[in-house]
Image (cartoon, rainbow, N blue to C red):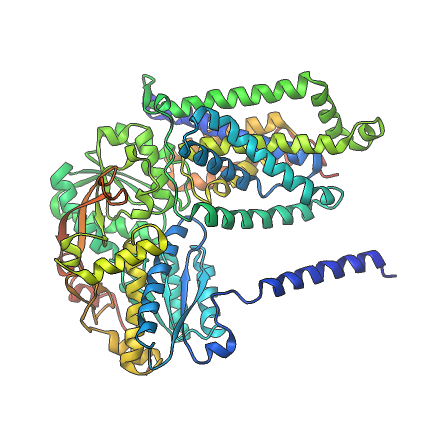
Amino acid sequence: MFEHVAPELFNGLILGGFYAVVAIGLSLIMNLTGTVNMAHGSFLTLGGYLAFTLVARGTSFWVALLIAPLLTVIVGIAVERSMMVPLYRRDPVYSLLLTFGLSLMAEEAFRLIWGSRGLPFSPPPELAGGITLGFMQFPTFRLFIVVVLAVALGGLALFLLRTRFGLRLRAAVQDTEMIAALGTNTQILYMVNFGLGIFLAGLAGVLAAVMFQLSPTTGNQLLMPAFVTVIVGGMGSLYGALAGGILIGLAISLVTLYIPAASEVAMYILMAIVLLVRPRGLFGEEGIFG
Amino acid sequence: MKDPSLTRERFIQGTAAGAASLAFGVPAFVPRRSEAADMVIIGVAEPYSGVYAAYGESETRGAQAAIDAWNKKGGVMGRKVAMSKEDEQSDPGVGVQKARKLVNQDKAVALMGTVSSAVSLSITGAANALGTLFIDSGGHTDDVTGKSCKWNTFRVCHSTWMETHATGSTLAHKFGKKWYLITPDYAFGHALSTGYQDVAAKIGATIVHEDLTPLGTTDFSPYLTKVLPAKPDVLLILPQGDDFINCVKQANQFGILKKIAAGGPQVELEAVWALPPEARVGFWGMEWYYKGTTVFGAGNTVAQQWVAEYRKKYGTPPTARSFFGYTAMDRILWGINEAKSTDSVKISKVLEGAHFQSPLLDTTAFFRKEDHQLMWPMWTGTIRPNGTPEDKYDIFDLIDKQPALAIEQTVTEKAAVCKMNYPS
């Protein structure tokens, strides 16, 4: 029994952590501006493609792991400043439609630039292979992902909780008009906040390109679990996104062990239960969209 | 009272949408109405987005090559040929909509395409209702030429029965008789599973475990962690497209490919090229390959030139999907030319049982009259991870060739499930 359940539990935790990082990026953007970023998966894919291109041109994987998400942030901020700013004061449906359209256009753009065919992206030699954990052999790269996610989330927590800018961001989520009235430039808050969310998407994109595969659809395939994670964890809560991600990862892994064909619906069943019992999500606040 | 700003806003939105439509105009691949009247339009429904997009693109390139060749000869019935393309998104419902649109709106006289078996089946039904010829270029499930067969539907690629019976015995002989199946949970996967169960029963092999995976699965780790504890001799990987890449890549990450053999009914070059070299392993079925005397025959300069032109145009060699697209389109156009009509019944009658020598094969092939399956050989082999020094794309080592009659169900077996009911 243990030899079957332990690998699934361990794997589910890592998968959940991965979903959580994508979901936290989504949550950050949603919390401050009410934007449901349907193009989040496209930024994730872009991060993967940029890292692949950098590595193919001789850049070290370690450098690409940092540079590719930063380049993704530049593209993200350009999109945010040029297209999303005018929609911040409108109904969230407007930005939802815009980002949905952007995601369709981005998929076609990836196809035009990098082709329809998937691209081969290997981990660097030091992260290839596996480590024996006693109950199973586990890929080194997946363990590395845990470290990267922990560092990224720790850094984000420090930024939000221990810096003045983070304090302003949290205050803006509570009451944007008040913080604007107190003299804070909310446009910079919006921009940096969006950039943070996109950085996490770009980072997840590099990791996903190596762990899964790199094709124009990579990000969009990961977007739905991330949205479900946000709903389960509760809109407006970053802790909720983390908890939701881990719950979903565990649910998928354990259901796969016993009812493999139901693995895809497992997260939706979990979401339905959470919505029935606690409609705002596990850690969510009421009326996030006012 | 009307809100003027709202009215203006709506006006801007409306004009913006209208302007955008005008700017993009009619898609470039749809011939203008005046041209279309003089042309023979063939509707091509392929997945250009989603997990099978790369395959849809290859089939379309092959189909375009066939159109170019026919137009170079003067077209069919003295008319030039053009294709009208639609993205069926690997969605059976969308496939039906696109088939109707191609026939009713674009005036396509015949349809071809599809990769997902579920879409092949849905378009088979839609084309039958429309009374339009449909050649399934790339959806493998047995039902297309089995219990769901139709007088107007033909299939180019091999059936799942052919694929499993071309590979099953060799997999057992080479690696062992305890099989672990990872199967995509839709028509294609179910049909492959049935095929391998039949082979296993005939040769005394055992399927120690089978997991059904939803189409579009990204993370296969929950399935893969169960493989080694089940102690199989071979891991049979049945998903295709992006799912194949994800599954094989992750099986390698979990160290499975180093411990047990892997293989399956078909491997597609588009997918293997997307794998890192360390994950390019296994024994697989191959439906067509762009080089090798067992495919083209010795000294087939026409085929070699075709491959060279394709490579020059697209940068990569043609794949089995390119061959499917080429053959499906070529047969439609040959059928129209031979029948001297675009009437689907007449074309179907002409296609049935007609042997032809493809320039890209060393043997003749034909659509079997009883089930409309194209009867042509299939190959098996192993993967060369890094290609050859001269050609990095040349990653498949052909080992064996199986004749169609040895791997497909007999006419008698098919007659029990497939009933062709031509319109009276």
Please state if B80 lies on the left or on the right of A147 as rendered. left
Please count the marks in the image: 0
Relative image position of residue B26 (x, y in whole percent): 55, 67
**Residue A95 falls in which quadrant of the image?**
top right
- Relative to A129, say whether B251 is above or below: below
Residue found at the very far right of the displayed protein: B1
- Relative to A142, say whether B279 is above or below: below
The reply to whether residue B2 is in sight is yes
- Relative to A157, say whether A290 is above or below: below
The residue positioned 53% from the left and 42% from the top of the image is: A42
User: The N terminus of chain B appears in which quarter of the rendering?
Assistant: bottom right
Please state if A32 lies on the left or on the right of A154 as rendered. right
Relative image position of residue B131 (x, y in whole percent): 38, 76
Relative image position of residue B279 (x, y in whole percent): 29, 35
Relative image position of residue B107 (x, y in whole percent): 45, 75
The reply to whether residue B176 is in sight is no
The residue positioned 59% from the left and 48% from the top of the image is: A102
Looking at the picture, tell me which residue is in the foreground, A10 or A138. A138
**Residue B103 falls in which quadrant of the image?**
bottom left
The residue positioned 25% from the left and 54% from the top of the image is: B160
User: The C terminus of chain B appears in which quarter of the rendering?
Assistant: bottom left
Looking at the picture, tell me which residue is in the foreground, A42 or A280. A42
Looking at the picture, tell me which residue is in the foreground, B214 or B33. B33
